[in-house]
């Protein structure tokens, strides 16, 4: 095979590689039509990077240069729909904006973590919670392994809702330093994959939800969201929803959660999941599937991932406060009278 033939063969291989990669990449933009397309959307960035890499030899090969440029442009545009907030075709729900702390308003912290049902280093999780002392902790994959471990936190987190589930992966849980609202108790819903509790934060009530969605299609994530829709719609006016959603923030699944609950996503916090067999330095190539949603009087100050604690998910810490309560009519009249005098 001469050099010219070899170059053309390599160009054809690269051409068909870009075609094959572009199919699931484009399909991911149609996640609303079928959950199979939405499964492709979760890997949008990975597919876009692969497409641009495959386009490089085409750009250098004259007969396919135009196709290579188009493929590279498609990959770049796909990445902008994920990261470019000003890009006109950006998809997915708008993220909640951060606001600076008000020195007069107390700030609270919520820690979200998928424990990993068979975490080999549970001590790291307990140590992290002990050091960070978040006001509320939402947990996923609370397997029987974790029953005794979480009991060690009972004095620090006496207010709790722990949901059991039949399979080995375990259910969800909400642990709180703050008491639950008087006359209320936590609930386990959707077979232990959704927990809610109304937490009393200095006399203000915030409904906290912990969620663990199933894997995307061909698994039952879409059906689970359908089943949860009425529960999400009934969350109180001021609420926070946290969990492992097994869905990227730009996916149709995440948008459906936001639409059903009337909440706004917080973040993004960056990649939170990576397979345990992969080294930590590849975390940047992981998937951002652990999320916080909020609505009502919740004011977000910051969101960040913390160090790894033996799970394939990173902990996510969000700091927030509540809008100042509006004065009651009697209080307003009293204040007005005082000004007149």
Image (cartoon, rainbow, N blue to C red):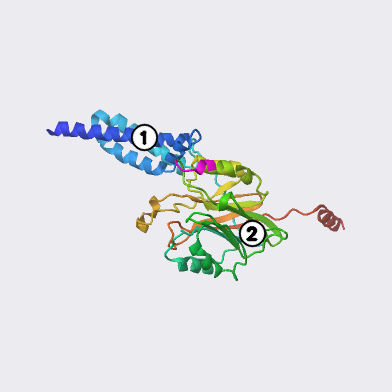
Residue 309 screen position, x and y as percent: 44, 63
Q: Secondary structure at mark 1?
A: helix
- For disc 1, the marked residue is 22
Mark 2 vs mark 1, foreground winner is 1
Badge 1: residue crowd in 10 Å (few <14, some 14–19, many ≥20)? some
Can residue 159 be seen here? yes
Image quadrant holding the C terminus, namely bottom right
Q: Is residue 220 magenta?
A: yes
- Would you place residue 214 above or below residue 276 in this image? above
Can residue 92 be seen here? no
Badge 2: residue crowd in 10 Å (few <14, some 14–19, many ≥20)? few
125 or 186, which is in the foreground?
Answer: 186
Residue furthest right in the image: 341
Report, in whole angstroms, how far the alpha carbon at label 2 lies from the one at label 1: 47 Å
Kindly identify the residue that appears in the image at 31 percent across and 41 percent down: 53
Residue 336 screen position, x and y as percent: 83, 54
Residue furthest left in the image: 2
* Dot label at residue 173: none
- For disc 2, the marked residue is 102
Kindly identify the residue that appears in the image at 49 percent across and 54 percent down: 167
Label 2–label 1 contact, CB within 8 A: no
Residue 50 screen position, x and y as percent: 33, 41
> Where are the magenta residues, as a range?
218-223
State the image quarter where residue 36 is shown: top left
């Amino acid at each position: 095979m001469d050099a010219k033939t070899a170059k053309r063969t390599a160009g054809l291989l690269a051409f068909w590689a870009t075609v094959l990669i572009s199919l699931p990449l484009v399909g991911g933009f149609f996640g609303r039509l079928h959950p199979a397309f939405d499964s492709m959307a979760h890997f949008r960035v990975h597919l876009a990077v692969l497409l641009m890499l495959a386009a490089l030899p085409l750009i250098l090969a004259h007969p396919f240069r135009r196709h290579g440029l188009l493929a590279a442009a498609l990959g770049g545009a796909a990445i902008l729909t994920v990261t470019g907030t000003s890009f006109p075709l950006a998809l997915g729900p708008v993220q909640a904006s951060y606001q600076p702390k008000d020195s007069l308003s107390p700030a609270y912290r919520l820690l979200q973590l998928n424990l990993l049902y068979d975490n080999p280093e549970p001590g790291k999780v307990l140590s992290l919670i002990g050091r960070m002392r978040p006001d509320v902790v939402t947990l996923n994959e609370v397997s029987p392994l974790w029953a005794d471990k979480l009991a060690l936190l009972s004095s620090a987190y006496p207010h709790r809702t722990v949901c059991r589930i039949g399979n080995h992966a375990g259910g969800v849980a909400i642990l709180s330093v703050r008491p639950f609202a008087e006359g209320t108790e936590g609930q386990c819903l959707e077979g232990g994959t959704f927990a809610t509790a109304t937490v009393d934060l200095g006399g203000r009530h915030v409904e906290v939800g912990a969620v663990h969605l199933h894997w995307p299609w061909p698994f039952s994530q879409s059906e689970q969201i359908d089943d949860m829709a009425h529960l999400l719609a009934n969350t109180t006016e001021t609420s926070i929803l946290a969990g492992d959603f097994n869905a990227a923030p730009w996916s149709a699944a995440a948008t459906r959660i936001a639409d059903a609950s009337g909440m706004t996503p917080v973040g993004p916090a960056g990649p939170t999941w990576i397979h345990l067999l992969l080294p930590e330095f590849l975390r940047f190539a992981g998937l951002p599937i652990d999320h916080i949603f909020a609505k009502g009087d919740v004011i977000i100050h910051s969101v960040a991932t913390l160090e790894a604690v033996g799970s394939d998910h990173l902990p996510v810490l969000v700091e927030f406060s509540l809008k100042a309560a509006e004065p009651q009519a009697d209080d307003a009249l009293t204040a007005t009278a005082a000004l007149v005098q």
